Amino acid sequence: MASLSTQGVGSGLDIAGIVSKIMTLEKAPLVKLGTRQVELQTQLSAYGKLKSSVAKLQTGLTDMVEPDSFEAAKASSSTPTVLTASADAGAAKGSYVVEVRRIAEAHRMVAGTVLANADTATVGSADETMTLKVGSKSFTVNVGGKTLNQIRDAINSATGNAGVTASILRDDQGSRLTLSANSTGAAGFIEVSYQSVSAPSTPGPDLLGLTATNVDRNASGGFTSADLDAELRLENSFTVTSSTNNVSGVLDGLTLNLIAAGTSTVSVARDTSGVTAGMQQFVAAFNDVLKTLDDLRAQTLSDDSASLLAFETQLRNAIGARVSGSSQFSTLAELGIVTKKDGTLTVEASKFTKAMGKDPDGITAMFTNTVNGAAVRLKRVTDDVLGAGGMFDGREQSLKGRIRQTEKQRTNMEYRLGQREIALNKQFNTLDTLIAGLTTSGNYISTQMAALGIGK
């Protein structure tokens, strides 16, 4: 806004000061609009904070309304040095005897051909090649006239490498090539053959003498690809082979991680500790919403305290109402989920675990029943307030509209005030000019009167 920084030339008036004081008074409504805009932005941020807290609760409830979240199972192994086990919700509860006869191995081969130096000594003649086959895939590399290091690098960098890693073994005799399948089991069985570039269909000489370091483990009379598979026996009756040491699908929902030969009893039970931990997380999220509501209702959103109180009442009714059904329990308090003096919830873990032991299916239904389950009811409340047209959507849209309106009012008022300041400066400068003229005229008249002797 325009302003003068000097006193009036003819009058000595502090025009800038006068205009500044007038404008300070006239700017009072603009200051109020600015304060109101800050308040509206603060309220919008407050609703964003509350919305985030409720959304976190809603996310937890998304899992909690599913029966699987209450039917989690845990598996344990009596001999973890033989195998470990994990279970999902579909695992059948019980105990199973598992004998690990052998674990899955990767096919390994070592060359019988020994070279004095892997960097300088070469193998065969220039046109000789080696084909490596793993399962149904194969690839060919040039080996003739190359050092062991060059052969190793050619295998490892081959575009069509089907799952083989080459390396160099150095012992007291010298250096030799080794091969290892990248995966365990029969599917990783490596086959090696030699040819020449000039006669690719004619078998060439065995340049490296690669032989398996794996041994016959299934008493078949010699090492075969089948010896690479893991083998286990269930309940002393059923034989299972696996290409990996991570065995799943043998028992519903159960995964076995084989470590060494031996026998172990795998026990599968309902994971009540996991359910209890999940319940504690839910209660923490619920309490966070309550705390956020209390803080905002007492401060930033005090003007909307009635609506926030109504929302809190919905939350408490959803979690506190009796649940009818087949469970021997009907309220969450009977499960150990109780309300403290400050209004927040807490989980009495031992009581909840004991209740789960008595009636796990009934408790699952108390939360997940699609008609009146506690988690289902509570999720409906969070879905309603977070959804399009819900409380948060309505409040946010209203506040954003009011913020836009206030900003527009500020812009218009700033323009008018700017024009007002220009007008005031113009008026006072005109007055200053007038006063200057009157002063000059007065001084002239005084001079003439003195010359005439008038007034003496």
Image (cartoon, rainbow, N blue to C red):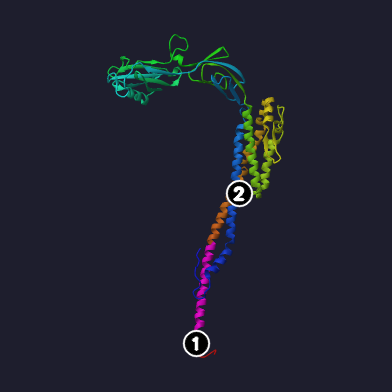
- Ranked by sequence position, the earlier of labels 2 and 1 is 2
Quadrant of the image occupied by residue 407: bottom right
Mark 2 and mark 1 in contact? Answer it, CB < 8 Å.
no
Q: Nearer the viewer, residue 83 or 311?
A: 83
Residue with the mark numbered 1: 448
Three-letter code for the amino acid on which mark 1 is drawn: Gln
In the image, residue 56 sits, relative to residue 299, either above or below, namely above
Quadrant of the image occupied by residue 313: top right
- Where does the image place residue 337, in percent across and percent down from the top left? 68, 34
Q: Main secondary structure of the magenta part?
A: helix
- Where does the image place residue 325, in percent across and percent down from the top left? 71, 28
In the image, residue 165 sits, relative to residue 385, either above or below, namely above
In the orientation shown, which residue stands out farthest toward the top? 221
Instruction: From the viewer's perspective, tell me whether residue 163 is left or right of residue 144.
Output: right
Q: Nearer the viewer, residue 372 or 242?
A: 242
Could you tell me which secondary element the residue under label 1 belongs to? helix
Residue drawn at 62 percent across, 26 percent down = 271
- Where does the image place residue 382, in percent across and percent down from the top left? 63, 38
Q: Which mark is residue 361?
A: none
- Tell me if residue 424 is in the magenta stretch: yes
Q: Nearer the viewer, residue 259 or 285?
A: 259
Q: Which mark is residue 43?
A: 2
Alpha-carbon distance for marks 2 and 1? Answer: 73 Å
Magenta region: which residues? 416-444
Could you tell me which secondary element the residue under label 2 belongs to? helix
Q: Is residue 370 visible?
A: no
Q: Nearer the viewer, residue 387 or 166?
A: 166
